[in-house]
Image (spheres, rainbow, N blue to C red):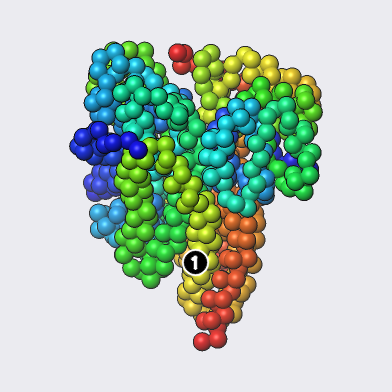
Amino acid sequence: MAESKLPVNILVRTVLRSFFLQASWNFERLQNLGIVFTLAPALRHLYRGQELAKACRRHLEYFNTHPFMAAPVLGSILALEEKQAKGEQGYLDVHEFKSMIMAPYAAIGDAFFWGGVRPLAAAIALFFAAKGSLWAPVVFLLVFNIPHLWLRIGGFLKGYLSGLKVIEVIQRRRLPDLAIRIKECMVILLGGLSAYLTLIALKAEDLSTGWGLVVAPIVLFVGWLAARGFSSLVLVLCSSAILLILAQFENFLNL
Amino acid sequence: MVIENYLIAGTVAVLAGLDRMAVLQIMISRPIVAAPLAGWLLGAPLVGLQVGGLLELLWLGRLPVGAAIPPDDTQVAVGSVALAVTAGRMLDYSEPEFVILCMLVAIPLGKCGQVFDRMARDWNGKMLHRAEMNPEVIGEGSIERYHLQGLIHFALSSLATFTVILVGGLIILNYTALWFIIPVGKTLNWLSLAFPLIGAAVIIGTINVSRSMSLFGASFATVILIFWIL
Amino acid sequence: MNLVLARIDNRLIHGQVLEAWVPFIHADCIVVANDKVAGMTFQRVLMEAAVPRRIRVVFTTIEKVPETLASEEILARRVLLLFATSDDALRAHQRGAEFTELNLGNMHGGKDKLRFSCTIALDAHDIENLESLEEDGVRIVSQCIPADRQMSWRKLIRHSGTSYGH
């Protein structure tokens, strides 16, 4: 295991800089400049002159991963760079490590955070919003950011302290399966939330609760349309138009 | 008043817009956070909460994976709140149906967000090229300054989207609000229900959970039946 | 065998494939056709760790693509086939891998490559490869995720590409 050679303040600066990872995201090489920016304090500590320029150039290669999963990757990169600066040869060099890890880690982060935690936090917060509580945004931020910041800070340290072994840690956690579990919970919550919102609307329209059972198949039908590629924009504009036309029709009948 | 609101909401639009991709990503960019924040600063927190609650789910299923650019729900949310407050005062509307009307205007206008976002990323690409053309920048501090310049590009793209929604929205509402406010008012309850339910439907339709439809249907029906029995 | 999507994606298994395409086409098996990856345990283990258990991942060399696709364990599955480059796709097709449509997902930039869309950068060699695939009756379209509009690659390259040089 690598010994801690970089001073603590440089590690802290790297974590803080990692929040700016995607500031210059581009279609050419995606997060590459961000990686150089984040690693710059550490690289300056490890290399001088020509060596430093070479190290920077090395990191300007194509790179893209999930912004939060980048934390353990950055930690491991620092551990590998430390070794490389001392002239030690590892199982993989920094370039090989980066190119192998970026896509699988991106997949894990996308599934876990974008597919799982974020909708889960939204589903929970929307119950508060439905009650008219201004705590909704606070709840959302808390549920999302606890795992987020834990990974950004804890994941970085784990990566730095365990180097290449960080992969085993990630592998043991079976995050993609956990992500599926979270998504299932989220879908159930979303069902409850949708039913709750339906009940609010039925009450406001003075209709019986039982009508809610008619709404469910409509939602599933819209879901089926979405699965066939209809976009939210089209769906929301069409259904608004249908509702507005129906309202006119009702108006007409009343006359 | 328009200028003042533009500056206040524009600041939220830029900060939340940067959070989408460029910095932090602590999710102040989500409608459920950005809209109440804008509403609070404009003196109408509940309008913000209404907009945030209705818009949050709509594009939540569109993930920012790889190089794919999802629709800019951040600017639609902040723009809808700014429109509801600003146009509401100008045209003298304060009903919840006017907020929905503002959202219906902001949603199609927000389409331009993806175009501006793409332009910002293209701009970043050109900047990367400039940074690499100049070998001396590497190793000194200036490559970091190049990187941070990207923030300006993303900020401008967010501000541009927000401006299109606010200015375009004010013009459109000025001519159409009078016609649509009554029908929208009549369907207020159903429209308020349609937004989150369509969002939920898109999520369960596109998520990679094989049983999403049955899980959703079962929990929906359970809640309805429990309330029916009680 | 039920091949539901063949795709060129230099990132192979990543978020777009798992979060967007897999649910859209209901795939339950991903075949990664790549000589380099097939030979590297470390990379294979990493990729497998990124995929939920209910989806099978099979790694194969380009040579063995047709064999793999015809194998017992894959016959009953809905397969998503991934290549990293146009070279690989052409070689696999010439060896007998049967796909009638090819999706261009991500083909990132590099020396002498021109960028034709956000995610597609091609050089003259790529275009040659795609042309021969087309001659063999493969329909080639670019579509990064299902929510994007599908576009014929001919239409894509009609616009002049952007070069940033190197």
Q: Nearer the viewer, residue C51 or B116?
A: C51
Left or right: A208, with A121 as reference point? right
Q: Residue at x 21, y 35 (%)?
A: A7
Name which quarter of the figure residue A18 lies in. top left
Q: For the residue marked with disc 1, what is the amino acid?
A: Leu
Q: Is residue A110 above or below residue C127?
A: below
**Which residue is painted at 67% across and 45% down in the image?**
C29
In x, y percent, where is residue C153? 66, 26
**Left or right side of A16 for A199:** right
Q: Chain of mark 1?
A: A
Secondary structure under tag 1 reads helix
Apparent side of residue A62 relative to residue C106 in the rendered image (left or right): left
Q: Along the line of sight, which residue is nearer the eye, B139 or A125?
A: B139
Q: Is residue B219 above or below residue B179?
A: below
Residue bearing the label numbered 1: A189
The number of discs equals 1
Pointer 1: residues within 10 angstroms few (<14), some, or many (20+)? Answer: many
The answer to whether residue B104 is above or below residue A24 is below
The residue depicted at 27 percent of the width and 43 percent of the height is B11
Residue at image coords 65%, 36%: C59
Looking at the rendered image, the quarter that the C terminus of chain C falls into is top left
Residue B218 in picture, x, y percent from top left = 60, 71
- Could you tell me residue C23's position as x and y percent? 62, 49
